[in-house]
Image (cartoon, coloured by chain):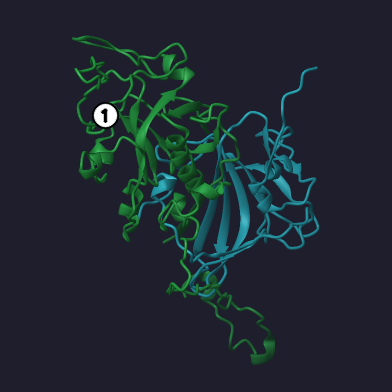
Amino acid sequence: MEQSPIDLPPVQKAVGSPVKALFNYEKVSIVADEDYLDKVKSGDPLKLQYYDGALRIFGNYLGKIVTMDGGVYHAQEISFHTPSEHKINGERFPMEMQILHVGKTVGDTAKHLILSFVFKKVPGVYNRFIDSLDFFNLPNPLDKYRDLEKELFLPNIFFTTKEEGKLI
Amino acid sequence: MKLIALITLISFFCFSIQLGKINNENSVLFNLWNNVPGMGGDDAESPNPTVSPTAKSSFDSSYSDTLVEGWLTVSNARFKDSDKYPIFTHPDGKAEILTSGDYTRINSAYKDRSPDEVGEIHRDEGSPPGRSFFYFRLNRQFLYFSETKTCVNVLGRVDWKNKVKPLSIHFMENPKCFHISENTGDTIRYCGKTHEDAKKFVCIMQTLLRVAQDDYCQGRVPDGPAIEGKPTHPPVIKPGQLVEKIITQPYILIPLAREQCNEHWDYANNGGDWKCLCKEGSL
């Protein structure tokens, strides 16, 4: 087993399996309902923040994964890496979004599980999840915090809109 | 030790147009021929398309069974696009794709012969019947062609399964010809000697693509795996024929969450059931 980040083989070499982990992501309110370490206070808005060299969103519960052996992992951090950390078939992508899950069940508490998405740049195509983060007004090393204005819904990452060019 | 499990999903949120030299007509696909039965075999004399009557039970070999074969012409305006089909220079001169005025590819293996005393033209077995005809074969993965029936050099192919997936097939105004529109942006015209020649290809390709087809095609394709492993249309069942079907019920596994550390814990046991090490990751 290699340590991440790695160069993944092409999709064609993936071995399909009908057995899958259970993914459960619901809408996350922009107001935190629980504390999370010293990063999020209950009642405060969730933030997109510049932290440790990357843009991140922290929350006590942003969704969960149940692995096939019953291990429960809660999503507690979303981070964006440009360019991507992982490669696929030698290709590095413009951006990677990692959802860090932390083990909660007995025997899994020291384990992490990362669900990772890589992005391609395509003119005129907008991702619904990325759009909800107001990507035109990002935090930076000097101004590190931006309150989220729209509730988080991670499955939106699978939806895109395409805008055709207009003649003005 | 910190264990990081990684699950990576690829989200290609795009309608990216993949142009380029995906389908190099000059390529030689020797591996393709390893699985093609009947090369220059017993049916070598038949000039018309023939339908293979058998389908093997093996998954992989089923893809390589030739479903239909015959002589067709192929026309594509991009044959003259040197970006896609570059001109090669070698010691014997330049090698390029020869076309006629309407971009129909010319078969350099064609040799015109004079009629004999009885007025018949004799050609080598398997040689093209006209200067624009190539020998096409269709299996469940490729439509591919070569200069002659016995030639092992594959000049071009349409890949049903992978990169060059045809989007649509339809007849043109000329009933001997049909179009294949590929997702590379190319629209290629194929013509048979007769409407029947072309129709045999079209019907089976429509079946493989699982698009609407006419009654003529019913029962043309042996039952078996088609594109992406999905079965083609049901085989024709004769009245009174006993059909045995094996149905395997699927198992659906839904993971059940294990107990979480100190879940629902309270003081009922005066702290006796508190798992101190659990939160530290020692269990």
Task: Residue B107: name its quadrant.
Answer: top left
Left or right, residue B118 beside residue B259:
left
Q: Which residue is mark 1?
A: B148
Task: Indicate the colour of chain A.
Answer: cyan
| Residue at 74%, 34% in the rendered image | A137
User: What subunit carries mark 1?
Assistant: B
Residue B209 in the image: x percent, y percent?
51, 46
Judged from the image, the secondary structure of the residue bearing numbered disc 1 is loop
| Residue at 28%, 40% in the rendered image | B32
Residue B196 in the image: x percent, y percent?
45, 37
In the image, residue B105 above or below residue B208: above
Q: Is residue B137 visible?
A: no
Q: Nearer the viewer, residue A99 or B262?
A: A99
Q: Residues within 10 Å of mark 1 (few under 14, many from 20)?
A: many
The residue positioned farthest toward the bottom in the image shown: B269
Of all chains in the rendering, the one displayed in green is B
In the image, residue B143 above or below residue B174: below
| Residue at 45%, 11% in the rendered image | B101
